[in-house]
């Protein structure tokens, strides 16, 4: 990469907009009597449902997305449980998307309630991405009565991390000259792609923040974490050359869980499968997607990996159907007879109405080693 190319990359202006507790906030908007009360949107507790979104009042009780609704009920008995209204959520999302188009047409939706915007060149001829982010927040509130958090930076990874930094209703800006300091002080749990099990593994290596992660050589990261070690090596250096793109259809949607220790207990594996099916069902319903093919991924203690797939007669997006398919597929593996360190569940074969995007291509192994300001945000 030439110095000129590095400078151009650092001059990019990316905004990540993330609506605050979107589903729950819409419910509180439509039901003023619920404002200030714990609202939980998702499946019903008595039906083994999963929490999709919890209001900030509910989060004070420790409730979060993907949590079993039964657990949420135990934590907050007085909570208001709502199954949700996807048609209403999509209507408001469409209005918010219209506001985005007032600024730029380079919009990459991540989900119904968040999106990247490339405002390097924009319709308002505004040079400051920070002022544009403030404009978007104000316009969204004026149009919908809802608040949004915004992150501004020179790449997608930093913009997304920034939008989560001061929720709700916050605005965080990370210019090139402050990127290293921000990343070095960031807790390892806050890095995109680092879940609970991975964070625990990092803590065992005495890696607690970005500064610690930065010191690890690439070969050590790959040895401990496999291919994703390349990803960790890059993001702590601020590397993310992905463009904000409006194309490329999403081909699959799923989740994986890496265990803190290898297991072969059938009961634990079944519980893991229940968690995965609940999480994937929540994501599918959130994106209004249904698919015919369910795939189970199992990684054994020796890092060997197998996948098993099942084609269903019709598209599905509910936990019960996914769990049934997952149990059939689990029997086609050696899980239980062999110890498992990772399990994943995904759905593909979406119907033609799907308009979702694949927004997470591979990151290149390039980092512009500079702390010098390039452009401004």
Image (tube, grey):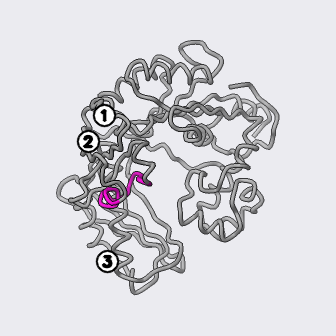
Rendering coords of residue 110 (x, y %): 44, 39
The residue located at (57%, 20%) in the rendering is: 132
Q: Which mark is residue 89?
A: 1
Disc 3 versus disc 1: nearer the observer: 1
- Can you tell which of label 1 and label 2 is closer to the viewer? 2
Q: Is residue 67 left or right of residue 83?
A: right
Q: Judging from the image, what secondary structure is the residue with disc 2 in?
A: loop
Q: Which residue is mark 2?
A: 84
Q: Secondary structure at mark 1?
A: helix
Q: Which residue corresponds to mark 3?
A: 332
Residue 359 lies, in percent from the top left, at: 48, 43
How far apart, in angstroms, are the residues tagged by discs 1 and 2? 9 Å
State yes or no: discs 3 and 1 in contact (Cβ < 8 Å): no
Q: Earlier in the sequence, mark 3 or mark 1?
A: 1
The residue segment tinted magenta is: 62-74
Image quadrant assignment for residue 170: top right
């Amino acid at each position: 990469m030439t110095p000129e190319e590095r400078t151009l990359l650092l001059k990019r202006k990316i905004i990540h907009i993330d609506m605050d507790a979107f589903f729950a906030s819409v419910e509180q908007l439509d039901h003023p009597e619920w404002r200030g009360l714990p609202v939980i949107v998702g499946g019903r507790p008595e039906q083994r449902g999963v929490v999709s979104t919890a209001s900030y009042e509910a989060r004070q009780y420790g409730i979060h997305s993907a949590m079993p609704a039964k657990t949420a009920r135990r934590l907050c008995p007085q909570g208001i449980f709502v199954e949700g209204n996807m048609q209403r959520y999509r209507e408001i999302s469409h209005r918010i998307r219209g506001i985005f188009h007032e600024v730029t047409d380079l919009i990459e939706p991540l989900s119904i309630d968040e999106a990247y915007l490339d405002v390097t060149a924009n319709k308002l001829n505004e040079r400051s991405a920070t002022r544009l982010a403030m404009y978007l927040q104000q316009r969204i509130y004026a149009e919908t009565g809802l608040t949004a958090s915004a992150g501004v930076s020179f790449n997608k990874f930093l913009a997304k991390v920034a939008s989560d930094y001061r929720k709700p209703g916050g605005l965080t800006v990370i210019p090139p000259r402050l990127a290293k300091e921000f990343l070095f002080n960031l807790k390892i749990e806050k890095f995109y792609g680092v879940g609970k099990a991975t964070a625990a593994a990092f803590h065992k290596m005495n890696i607690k923040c970005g500064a610690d992660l930065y010191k690890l050589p690439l070969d050590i990261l790959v040895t401990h974490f496999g291919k994703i070690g390349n990803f960790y090596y890059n993001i702590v250096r601020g590397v993310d050359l992905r463009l904000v793109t409006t194309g490329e259809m999403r081909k699959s949607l799923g989740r994986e869980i890496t265990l803190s220790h290898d297991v072969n207990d059938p009961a634990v594996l079944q519980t893991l499968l229940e968690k995965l099916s609940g999480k994937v069902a929540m994501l599918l319903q959130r994106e209004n997607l249904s698919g015919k093919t369910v795939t189970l991924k199992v990684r054994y203690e020796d890092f060997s990996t197998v996948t098993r797939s099942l084609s269903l007669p019709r598209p599905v997006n509910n936990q019960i159907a996914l769990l049934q398919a997952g149990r059939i597929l689990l029997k086609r593996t050696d899980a239980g007879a062999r110890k498992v360190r990772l399990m994943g569940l995904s759905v593909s074969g979406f119907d033609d109405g799907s308009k979702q995007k694949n927004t997470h291509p591979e990151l290149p192994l390039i980092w512009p080693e500079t702390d010098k300001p390039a452009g401004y945000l």
